[in-house]
Image (cartoon, grey):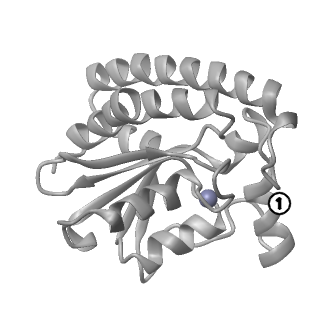
């Protein structure tokens, strides 16, 4: 699949498939993180999900998506699938994606964004406290998978496409900012251990 198509398609899935679920999830007290699974062959959506930590603190967007995936009666081989995470996966989700057999994942926001723009420092703090890793200290490409931010995918595209994606990027960031404000203002009322 051509990279221009991939970057734009991943943004579309965030905007059209994940964000509506996350808006409901945040209204119910959950965090802003979401994920989706797409077919490599035609970039069609297999499923999208969102964080559901109010039910179980392990239901991060990614793990909750994988849970739903394994509940499907008919499912493709994970080698034929793309994993999309709205935010760079935490150490649990990095491992979950690996154990599920994906050879890739893409994300929109970085760990630093989660800490600085979303006031969620836990991803980087766990990497540091448990694994002694500084930010950026895990292998983004390794024997199991290749990972990339959507921004990195988009950076070699032609200027017109980049401009179109930048407009969409800004629109997505605005929606997440509102969701983050909503989550942060209500989080003292939830029972999520690392809120
Ligand atoms: Zn996670």
- Numbered-mark total: 1
Question: Does residue 25 sit above or below 62 in this rendering?
Answer: above
Q: Which residue is mark 1?
A: 125
Q: Residue 138 versus residue 158: which sits nearer the camera?
A: 138
Number of other residues with Cα within 10 Å of mark 1, as a class: few under 14, some 14 to 19, many 20 or more:
some
Q: Is residue 9 left or right of residue 44?
A: right
In the rendered image, residue 65, in percent from the top left (x then y), is placed at 43, 56
Q: In the rendered image, which quarter is residue 8 located in? A: top left
- Ligand 1 resides in the quarter of the picture at bottom right
Q: Does the beta carbon of the residue at mark 1 sit less than 8 Å from ligand 1?
A: no
Q: Which residue ends up furthest to the bottom in the rendered image? A: 143
In the rendered image, residue 145, in percent from the top left (x then y), is placed at 40, 73
Q: Residue 7 versus residue 121: which sits nearer the camera?
A: 121
Q: Is residue 155 left or right of residue 186?
A: left
Q: Secondary structure at mark 1?
A: helix
Q: Which residue: 20% across, 67% down?
A: 80
Q: Which residue: 46% across, 25% down?
A: 169
Question: Does residue 24 sit above or below 46 in this rendering?
Answer: above
Q: Is residue 178 left or right of residue 84?
A: right
Q: Residue 81 versus residue 65: which sits nearer the camera?
A: 65
Q: Which residue: 69% across, 28% down?
A: 180
Question: Does residue 141 sit above or below 111 in this rendering?
Answer: below
Question: Does residue 137 sit above or below 48 in this rendering?
Answer: below
In the rendered image, residue 77, in percent from the top left (x then y), is placed at 21, 73
Q: Which residue: 79% across, 55% down?
A: 122
In the rendered image, residue 13, in percent from the top left (x then y), is placed at 33, 36
């Amino acid at each position: 699949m051509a990279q221009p198509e991939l970057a734009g398609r991943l943004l579309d899935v965030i905007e059209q498939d994940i964000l509506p679920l996350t808006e409901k999830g945040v209204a119910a007290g959950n965090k802003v993180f979401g994920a989706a699974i797409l077919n490599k062959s035609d970039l069609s959506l297999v499923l999208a999900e969102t964080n559901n930590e109010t039910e179980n603190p392990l239901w991060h967007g990614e793990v909750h998506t994988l849970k739903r995936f394994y509940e499907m009666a008919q499912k493709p081989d994970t080698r034929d699938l793309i994993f999309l995470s709205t935010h760079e996966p935490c150490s649990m989700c990095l491992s979950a994606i690996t154990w599920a057999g994906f050879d890739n994942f893409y994300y929109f926001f970085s760990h630093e964004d989660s800490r600085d723009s979303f006031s969620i420092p836990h991803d980087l703090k766990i990497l540091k406290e448990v694994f002694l890793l500084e930010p950026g200290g895990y292998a983004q490409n390794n024997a199991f998978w290749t990972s990339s931010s959507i921004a990195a995918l988009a950076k070699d595209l032609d200027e017109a496409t980049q401009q179109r994606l930048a407009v969409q990027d800004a629109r997505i960031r605005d929606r997440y900012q509102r969701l983050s404000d909503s989550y942060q203002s209500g989080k003292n009322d939830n029972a999520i251990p690392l809120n």
